[in-house]
Amino acid sequence: MKIWTLAAALSVASMAALGGCSKTPGGETGPETPAAAVTSAEAPRVAEAAYATRAYFGDTHVHTGWSADAGMDGAITTPEDAFRFARGDLVKSNSGQDAQLRRPLDWMVITDHSDGMGTINEIRAGNPEMISDPFLKHMYEVMKSGNEEESGKVVRELINLQSNGKLPKQVLDPRWMVSAWAKTIEIADKYNEPGKFTALIGYEWTVNAGGGDNLHRNIIYRDAADKAKAMLPLTTFETQDPEKLWEWMAKYEATTSGKVLAIPHNGNLSNGRMYEETTFTGGPMTKAYAEARSNWEPLMEVTQIKGQSEGHPSLSPNDEFASWDLWDRSNLNGVPKQPGMIRAEYWREGLKSGLRLEAALGANPFKYGANGATDTHTGLSTADDDNFWGKFKTVEPGPDRWKRDVTKPYLGWEQAAAGYTGVWATTNTREAIWDAMKRRETFATTGPRMTVRFFGGYAFGDDDLSDLVKAGYGKGVPMGGDLGESPDGKAPSFLIAAVKDPEGANLDRVQVIKGWLGADGKTQERVYDVKWAGERKPGADGRLPPVGNTVDLKTATYSNSIGAPELTARWTDPDFDPKAKAVYYVRVMEIPTPRWTAYDVVRFKAAMPAKVTMIHQERAFSSPIWFDPAGSNVATAVTIPGPAQPSAAPKP
Ligand SMILES: [Zn+2]
Ligand SMILES: [Zn+2]
């Protein structure tokens, strides 16, 4: 970890966004070490920049063998294995293969399920109290037999029993959670190295409402074990109602003076419930509800192994990139989708609905920034297509994993090797990473470590592109921020910079996706091509021609002979209506690259049918910037991180 002073951080701040980057040992982009940098030998502390100068990449959603479904499926990795893997160590996978990340992550959260926490290890060990129940005895025997097909069936039955409130009473006993939670948080503290690798404490609250409607939330702590131990994680045995979760979070904060946030995921598997416009129990939304939801849930996971929840082609028919990684046939338990459900499942539509609800309620319940994660159940956080370890042990690398069941009705090949979150933080500590998540200064990627900067304001000029980050923070708001009433009805402009993954593919284009609330009370959206690689010109239909394709499927390779390493622009909304609430976010598209299935074909000679996707365009999504004509002015709308000061000292 390089350490730099405040003055140096300011002077190099823009380089990180504009590609003037050096490769750190971790492989992520970072500013060149300024002359004033001190060596770690003379300064055993973590310096903090005045504002976020670097994107730290990590995963908010990782299950180990300690999650009941993962353990039942044969996962034996522990939280220690998961942290070691994330920081770059070589570990043994659940199927006994050597697994290692090519580049370590900067931070990670382990989110084993709170439901049944601690019980799977007891069942595996044949604890007599557990196996006195016939179903748990069956689990024990299947685990002992190692029969993968039978394990898969039991995992599905487990989800079925959990989502219908029919789990055996032994699993509901919080006693097992006490020691599992104590160990979980102790291990996170052990692996947390401020300034080098951040191990955040977390858990998953896994609500499968009404038999499998996915309303899961990951709870992420800013704190160490001394505070996190004060309360046991909330389970869905106690409640399935998110308002009760927020009460639990408020109680935790009041009790410990700690801080927690929640990130929902897989709206795509919620069968119309993630963005439903009532409370969980069917009551009307209120302003208090909307304020609580946006306060406790700053981010939404929009891409992960079980498909994307960003947007859907049926909702965005004019978006030629809307059809990717779709898991849109059922809820988590295989219950088929009915017409109309998709409208309340995807982030983009939710952001638009949020504007309409804000006009009605006075607060926006769906004010979600962008988050990407894996939701791996192997303990191995991998989102690289050429090093993808799958959702479960049974789909770890092997010649026939593409055709195995993952979660019925979805098959192995449908898994997405996704995703990670880039966090624009002032340093790599629990506090700085968490604070950036809370203020929504994050972007989601489908795996590649490309970076995206996005600032909105009314005072930007083209000159500001030369020192984009300084101008962005100084004259506007970063991603996650709010723009208030426009001076003289002037349209806002946006500073945008995207830089390719230093070890990955070039970029095709940068786009702004805008949603707005019309005077008729209806929401609309539009996708704008802002900057692109090469000499392409939009056609008569306004569409930019495709960037091309260099993928060679025989070898699973591509070439950076097309595309651009970075794309930077100042963009002004050409359709701005000073009276209309709006939301803007950036989408960065890579050039086409081989999907993980293509690597499997080459590696394992796997023979997959023609319908299996082999080439894709990976992408990143910024958190939005919201425009509210009724809001306060830009200058006071967002708190920019305070002055530099040393933060948490590393452990001796
Ligand atoms: Zn989940
Ligand atoms: Zn999960």
Image (cartoon, grey):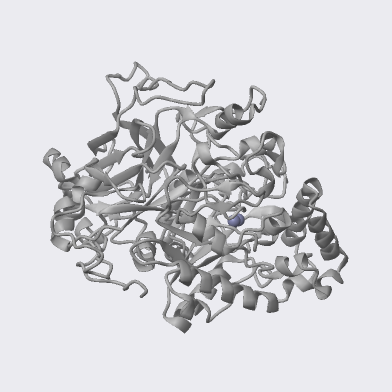
* 214 shown above or below 192: above
Q: Is residue 494 visible?
A: no
The one of 345 and 17 positioned closer to us in this rendering: 17
Answer left or right for 168 relative to 433: right
Q: Position of residue 171 (x, y in %)?
A: 75, 70
Q: Is residue 216 visible?
A: yes
Which residue is located at x 69 percent, y 61 percent? 68
Ligand 1 is found in which quarter of the picture?
A: bottom right
Which residue is located at x 33 percent, y 37 percent? 500
Q: Quadrant of residue 294?
A: bottom left
Answer left or right for 223 relative to 38: right
Q: Residue furthest top?
A: 540
Which residue is located at x 29 percent, y 53 percent? 54
Q: Position of residue 426 (x, y in %)?
A: 28, 61
Q: Position of residue 453 (x, y in %)?
A: 29, 46
Q: Quadrant of residue 509?
A: top left
